[in-house]
Image: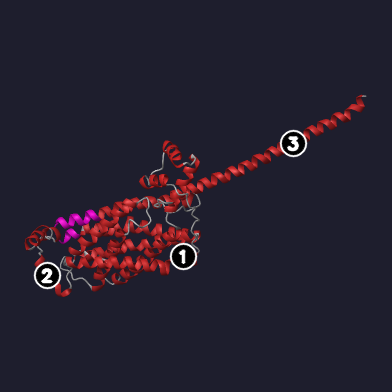
Amino acid sequence: MAIRMDILDQWLWKQEYWLPPGISWEDMRKMERTHCPLPRDLLLSLPIAFAFIGLRYIFERCVAVPFSRYLGVRDRIRVPVLPSPKLEAFYIQHRPQEPSQSEMITLAKQSGFTKKQVEVWFRHRRHLDRPSSTTKFCEACWRFVFYMVLFSFGLLSLVNAPWFWDQRECWKAYPLQPVEQAHFWYYLIELGFYWSLLLCVSVDVKRKDFKEQIVHHIATIFLLGFSYCSNYIRVGTLVMLVHDSSDFLLESAKMFNYAGWKKTCDSLFVIFAVVFLVTRLVVFPSKIIHTTLILSMEVFQPFMGYYFFNVLLLVLQALHIFWAWLILRMVYKFLFLGKLDKDERSDDDSLEDEEDGEEERSSWKKREEVLNSKLASLTSSCVLNNLKHQRANSSSRLPKSR
């Protein structure tokens, strides 16, 4: 066991990886009286993550669900499907994919349904697996409360910090910088929350950027963990504050969207879009990435941790650009089409849009049939009137000719 720990200390905790040249772990241990950041502190984030999962379970059922009813969130009526082992087995095996026309015919023969009934069965079966509006509201409500509380806490703890106003203060006496108690808990709570998001990603509402979300959570966890061990805590608090500043606005817009408050949702989304674009595409690269790439070189020479930390920041910036593109698409639809569509990242909305489209097409067919019948009756009435006029004229002319 001792040999394994020596190998771990030699390779994983090699000071050249984590600390700039000229600084050793012995120098960091001298700061323990003033709370030096130690790697073992990160283990506290795991029980915090499980505590968040339990707290979320209680919050959604005791707070979010009653609040959703108060705001008027309504779930769509779900039509149950007829039991069919053949169709159910095919659905479970090929859940993400639509059955082809040949597969539809084969399944119709195996199940004893018609081809149209098989299509309706699969549409209703997919609808049963879709998360309800209440489920999506509860998820958005939980994230809104967390982001708002943590953003308020982070802003209060940083507004008097010197590096909040002058980013060069992030590197003053680095890495021998003591960690304040508020920033210590700010880090661990944020890290524990992202661990909880990663652990619950398989049961949360899946969206179009599902893979990007996983990459974002993993990159954030690595970023927080590494920056804590390397005492990048000052710049790390700024990174967390920038991200939390717009997240609670997005979640609040989602909440009102699920509740049907369209005007409130549109207003909050516009505010979120402005804050997101300013903080993620202007403040983040110009202040934080510029600080870690350029200003830090005024204090120490590049080392492995410097490159690793900046690569993670650039990964986050790439994700910011991807999400900014999705947001700008929604803003374009809002400004030029006069409406704000549903969340561009939602996978499950595609089925709902498809069903809405089918309902619109069916209603249009009904309106078209009514219109055709009215046109036919109008045309027939016009023809009959013309015939009557012609007969009247002919009958009036006959006596004169006689």
Front: mark 1 or 3: 1
Q: Nearer the viewer, residue 65 or 10?
A: 65
Magenta: main secondary structure equals helix
Q: Is residue 87 visible?
A: yes
**Which residue is pictured at 67% across the width and 40% down the height?**
373
Residue 208 appears left or right of 338: left
**Which residue is pictured at 31% across the width and 51% down the height?**
211
Identify residue for label 3.
382
Check disc 3 and give the amino acid type: Cys
Front: mark 1 or 2: 1
Residue 303 appears left or right of 205: left
Quadrant where the N terminus is found in the figure: bottom left
Label located before the other in sequence (3 or 2): 2
**Which residue is pictured at 22% across the width and 72% down the height?**
180
Identify residue for label 1.
68
Check disc 2 and give the amino acid type: Arg
Is residue 305 within the magenta segment?
A: yes
